[in-house]
Amino acid sequence: MKQHLNTLFVTTPRSFLRKDGEAVAVRLDGETRLRVPLHHLGSIVTFGAIGVSPALMGACGKAGIAISFLNDHGGFLARVCGPTAGNVLLRREQYRRADDEPASLAIARMVVLAKVANARTVLMRAARDHPEALGRDELQRAVDRLGATLRDVEKAETLDSLRGLEGDAAKSYFAVFNAMITAQKESFVLDGRSRRPPLDPVNALLSFLYAILTHDTRSACETTGLDPAVGFLHRDRPGRPGLALDLVEELRSFLADRLALSLINRRQITAAGFVRQETGAYEMDADTRKAVLVAYQKRKQETITHPFLRETTTIGLVPHLQARLLARYLRGDLDAYPPFIAK
């Protein structure tokens, strides 16, 4: 079992990260504000104008600690990591399956089944926990539509038809997302899913959480020895981590969406923490971003029973477990890839 390692998020502008013995030192205005031993870290994520010394990059690469550089609102810029892990035979098999449509369809179908099932569970939970809330009937109709989609996904015969079903399910899900917001309803309204740029605070929050989740799934693929760029549902595109995005689909509603709803409904964040830019895009201010990151790390420390392995694990380890289960399937140790379907 992989030990649960922490991610160091650095959000303060003008910070500089350097190697200090066997630790990373975060310096600002000539002073060391934080010092963390390297063996306590699994990865480092920086936001905005953050500097990193070459010596620290080298030490992190040697220790298997990936450094991801994101812009101020969580958009991916670059990633520094050490030598590729895993053996070449696993990646060659991954490439063969990705080039074979029936083989890709078998894996992509499991990913979409998990995505739709987990989204449906989030809707059912919202309807159960808030029976008096406006939109409960709307939620139930969406639950029924996603149930029908699950049956269609099982019968999909091509990747294109599967992607069409996945897209329809996403539209049904986000069409009722506002019904799950039970507090600050006037300030947090999802006016359709917008990504580049996010045109409202809810979209900004979701995009930020999805970016962090993608970092985690990408690290899981690298650690397992899989190529994060070669997916089965998401096809090859320069600069896109297709396989990491496949794993994100399984986890986005369970981890990111539920966390976003909790942050809003419990008033842990407010609309005042989102700033509208001249472009129309919304970005979080520093305090809101810190609150979201703290909540995300806390969520990752929560324990669950893995639905396939029947073992107790932290939520933060789920991307690593799914990457390992996929590797076992590609090696022929499993008859099918078992996706993560939350209870």
Image (tube, rainbow, N blue to C red):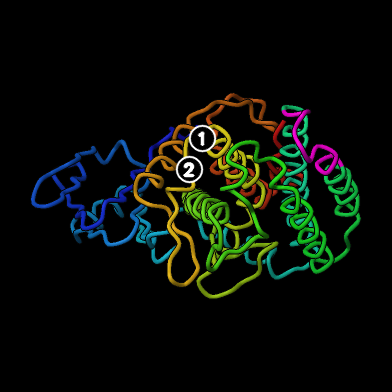
- Residue 224 as seen in the image, left or right of residue 104: left
* Amino acid type, residue under disc 1 in the picture: Arg
Q: Which residue is mark 1?
A: 267
Q: CA distance from mark 1 to mark 2?
A: 6 Å
Magenta includes 136?
yes
Q: Which residue is mark 2?
A: 270
* Amino acid type, residue under disc 2 in the picture: Thr
Up the image or down, 311 lies above or below 123; here it is: above
Residue depicted at x 57% and y 56%: 203
Q: Which residues are magenta?
A: 130-140
**Residue 45 visible in image:** yes
Image coordinates of residue 197 in percent, x first then y, are 53, 67
Image coordinates of residue 291 in percent, x first then y, are 41, 40
Residue in front for this viewpoint, 110 or 330: 110
Image coordinates of residue 123 in percent, x first then y, are 75, 39
Magenta includes 194?
no
Mark 2, secondary structure of its residue? loop
Up the image or down, 123 lies above or below 289; here it is: above
Residue 264: quarter of image? top right
Dot 2 surroundings within 10 Å: few (below 14), some, or many (20 or more)?
some
The reply to whether dot 1 and dot 2 touch (C-beta < 8 Å) is yes
**Residue 218 visible in image:** no
Image coordinates of residue 1 in percent, x first then y, are 50, 32
Residue in front for this viewpoint, 285 or 327: 285
